[in-house]
Amino acid sequence: MKACSMKDSYSVLAQVVLPMQANTAGNVHGGEIMKLMDNAAGVAAQKHARTNCVTARVEELNFKRPIHVGEIVSCKSQVIYAGRSSMEVFVTVESEDAINDRKQIALTAFFTMVAVDKHGKPCAVPPLTYDADNAYESKLYSEGEKRYLARNKRKS
Ligand SMILES: CC(C)(COP(=O)(O)OP(=O)(O)OC[C@H]1O[C@@H](n2cnc3c(N)ncnc32)[C@H](O)[C@@H]1OP(=O)(O)O)[C@@H](O)C(=O)NCCC(=O)NCCS
């Protein structure tokens, strides 16, 4: 199986927050953003695995800043670690006040996505490569690997 790089799976889903996605104070509901993040994680995982992928786990979901009606939400995702059939996808949500040209990171999370075959059974994914000279990619990969190994240790 041909290896894929971290950059190969990089994806961005963007949308404007509508009033029906928010509470009466204009703050977007957390579940609305989580759905977008799940979608973005699925897109990155499918780009890497080239097969159907399901969500198995979400870790370290951090709501750092509120998002308001009218802001642009950009959900960025990329596979940062690959096991045999599972992939860890880092998802970052940036909210943008386009009128005042202000951007901030509103949420981040790590999704474990599992590649499945047509019977819904886990199947192998391509190896993941990263740029060892890029400190950001190296850190994401080694932390992803640590979480993967720790999960396996807990399981056994
Ligand atoms: C995810 C799923 C396919 C795993 O199937 P399984 O038969 O338990 O698979 P295995 O135990 O052989 O594990 C397969 C891989 O998934 C990983 N995995 C399974 N459950 C996991 C979990 N809860 N968290 C993290 N990784 C998990 C394993 O570590 C393994 O990784 P590896 O192949 O890279 O080493 C299965 O549990 C499933 O279909 N779950 C429902 C998924 C779904 O419908 N999600 C939508 C949200 S409701």
Image (tube, helix red, strand yellow):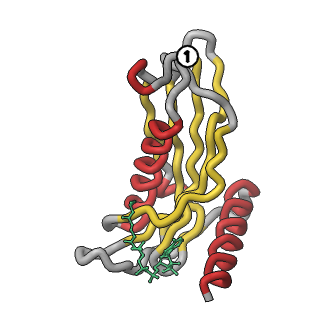
Q: Observer-nearest residue: 36 or 19? A: 19
Q: Which quarter is ligand 1 in?
A: bottom left
Q: Is residue 93 above or below residue 89?
A: above
Residue most extreme to the left: 118
Place of residue 84 in the rendered image (x, y in percent of width and height, measured from the top left): 49, 80
Which of the 4 image quadrants contains residue 44? bottom left
| Total numbered labels | 1
Residue at 45% of width from left, 36% of height from top? 32
Residue at 44% of width from left, 24% of height from top? 16
Q: Is residue 36 above or below residue 49?
A: above
Residue most extreme to the front: 24
The quarter of the image holding the N terminus is bottom left
Residue at 54% of width from left, 77% of height from top? 83
User: Which residue position is annotated with label 1?
Assistant: 25
Q: Is residue 111 left or right of residue 146?
A: left
Q: Is residue 38 above or below residue 52?
A: above
Amino acid at circle 1:
Ala
Place of residue 33 in the rendered image (x, y in percent of width and height, measured from the top left): 49, 38
